Image (cartoon, helix red, strand yellow):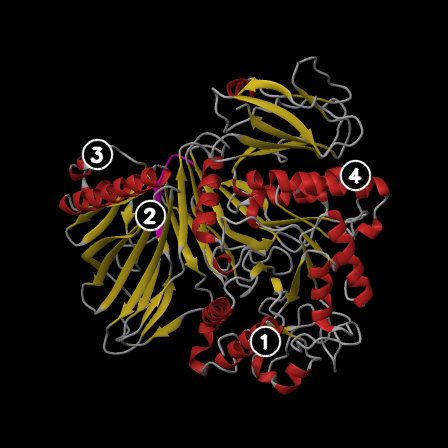
Amino acid sequence: MKMNLFFASVFLLTAMINVHGNAAANNNLILIETSNTVLVYRIDQEDVNLYYFGETLKQYDDFKLVEQNSHLGNIVSTYRGLAFNESSLRVTHHDGVLSTELEYVEHTVESIDPNTRQTTVVLKDNIYDFYVDVVFRAYHQQDVISISTRYRNSEPSAVHLYHFASSYLPVFSGRYFLTLFHGEWFGEMNMRETELVEGIRIIDSKQGVKTSDKFSPSFLVSLSHKAKENSGEVIGGTLAWSGNWRHSFEIDHRRKLHIVSGINPFGSDFRLESGNSFTTPEMLISYSSKGKGQISRNFHAWAREYGLLAGNEERPLIINNWEDTFFSFDEEMIKEIISDGADLGIELFVLDDGWFGTEYPRDNDSQGLGDWVVNREKLPGGIESLIEKAHSEGIKFGLWVEPEMVNKDSELFKKHPEWAIQEPGRRMYEQRNQYVLDLSNPEVQDFIVNTVSGILEEHPEIYYIKWDANSHFSNVGSPYLAANNQSYLGIAHTHGLYTVLERVRAKHPDIIMQVCASGGGRIDYGSLKYFHEFWSSDNTDAYQRIFIQWGTSHFFPAIAMGAHVSDVPNGITRRSFPIKFRFDVAMSGRLGMELQPSHMTEEELDFSKNALKYYKRIRPVVQFGDLYRLISPYEHNVASLMYVSDSKSKAVLFVYHHKWIYGDVYPDIKLQGLDPDARYLIREINKVGDFYIEDGQGPFSGEFLMKNGIKINTPFSRSDAHLTVSLMGEYDSVILEIEKVQ
């Protein structure tokens, strides 16, 4: 019966897509439509203009009556005599002419799958044989639209591309508030909201490799007022690209906002030869009239279905040796960690950096990178001995690699110095004592593919790869590329990375892989289509992780967010936290451990075993549920979020008291996403000593929990309400499991 209903829904959705596509064509309208959002373009003789971006409408005929001069902007913003705003396309034609004037040629609509409609709008310069194809993919159920652009040169000889954005989106509102996500190593995805004013605001990356270091390629634009979690118009955007990128936000003299997004044109102009084309990465956008929380749920749903590998499969519980041993370990130490982790209930052990190198053993970060041969002095039995140990303990084995980089002190660099990115005659700068390999070079691509595949073929029992990249471009030049094509390096390097990942994936489709780049330096949907998850940050300080994970959650789902429990005091911040607080924070993502069992007290061991059991129980809700951010750590000294299962039958609530100030008063925790007519039992998990809420309390109606909420008790602010949680000090926390009464 369920299958019949599913196919009936598919049939209706397909029929709807076809009807809307035909209606739009008859009306000279081009509709890019999801379940709740629509972009309305109109063909005005030779122009294609955007008239509306917002909630879907019941009918669109009225757009035929709208004055042409009331449109928001063209589908592509070109450099031409009548345009004075930032252009999404700037090309010098084969004869030196600088301007481009595009005219409508045709558009096509096709169903990619029952949920996805692709619309391609073809434009051509009115003089030159230069074509632009704007490609939209509308993901109906997820309310996400991707935009990419293909530039085709049919002129007699090469043209020169200077600006070649993925998308141009004009918006009109009284005021605009931009939320950007910034930070670097150990402090990723901090949030900053500012009001945009006349002029241009640009956020970008020029680092070549670490896409989300310094700034993330994700942003929110709230219309009329500051972004709210549950109300107001918000646009969310993120570029699916793992190289240099740029978003520009320009407010013109008429208070119109022009958003141009794509590959960063800085130092990236290039020749497009006659007969060739260039396709940009996808710009992903989502619109919500119900605040930024809905934007996040849209992107999470899209990611689990389209943006991640195996987004519908649970992620394992991991223990990693890095924060305990760093480079200083031997075989017995690693086997002890494997045994101890298995006893706790861990499902996967990952051996981090330091396992390789013979002539230049990887005993520190200054040597050995590039020489992917097991160091038998550290590991006499090799990787196979550790795999056997893991399997004997009933857990799986994973391995760290950093195949895109090389140390100067390595056999690889001695043999192939020309494989490193460098400029002739210039000093070669190092970051973390290493260079970036030139992935524009097919030989380098072959080396990386053969290296990773060789490890996996020699050890087919390896279940998981942590793929790291700890350097950015510091010597922007390629010995491989021609002298007149050096500015193409950033683009060619990223395409080379994707070629490598595609080839590795083709050979090893089932291997689970995590993307890492000095922590959270490569969190983007360009790379994530090859990976199952990302390492959120090298910062495992539980207090700071609340903010890192809060910011990250605006675009990326919990199932992809590696969140580990570490030892105290923290190795960098030197802060100490109760073990419960550390687990409670990590359990709102994909849980793992850097903390080693050998460092724990008996009480901590008992708590950890139970916490891992609890996580396995709530894992489906956390990893697949809808996220609701309830109380922001940016606005209060307490933070709260919850996940709700698709059926609304189960939910998990997290509450963190991350800062205590005498006299603070905290808001009630009003739950969201529940069935208002259902009744729910509440129980606390991860208890230490006296529990904060009676086990199995309730049942309460969903309506009561969402409208009345849960009161917070503090040492100097107590409530006699029936339903309360008590936060008795700084770094106190509560996890509540909420389940519908059958």
Query: In the rendered image, which residue does mark 3 sit on?
Result: 59
Tell me the residue at 60%/85% (across/down): 416
Q: CA distance from mark 1 to mark 4?
A: 43 Å
Decide which of tag 4 and tag 3 comes sooner along the chain: 3
- Which quarter of the rendered picture does the N terminus lie within? top left
Q: CA distance from mark 3 to mark 1?
A: 58 Å
Circle 2 residues within 10 Å: few <14, some 14–19, many ≥20 = many
Q: CA distance from mark 3 to mark 2?
A: 18 Å
Circle 3 residues within 10 Å: few <14, some 14–19, many ≥20 = few
Q: CA distance from mark 1 to mark 2?
A: 39 Å
Q: Residue 613, can we see it? A: yes
Query: In the rendered image, which residue does mark 1 sit on?
Result: 454
Tag 1: amino acid: Gly
Tag 4: amino acid: Pro
Camera-side mark, 3 or 1: 1
Q: Is residue 130 above or below residue 704?
A: below
The reply to whether the C-beta atoms of the residues labelled 3 and 1 are less than 8 Å apart is: no
Camera-side mark, 1 or 4: 1
Tell me the residue at 77%/39% (across/down): 607
Magenta stretch?
Answer: 168-175
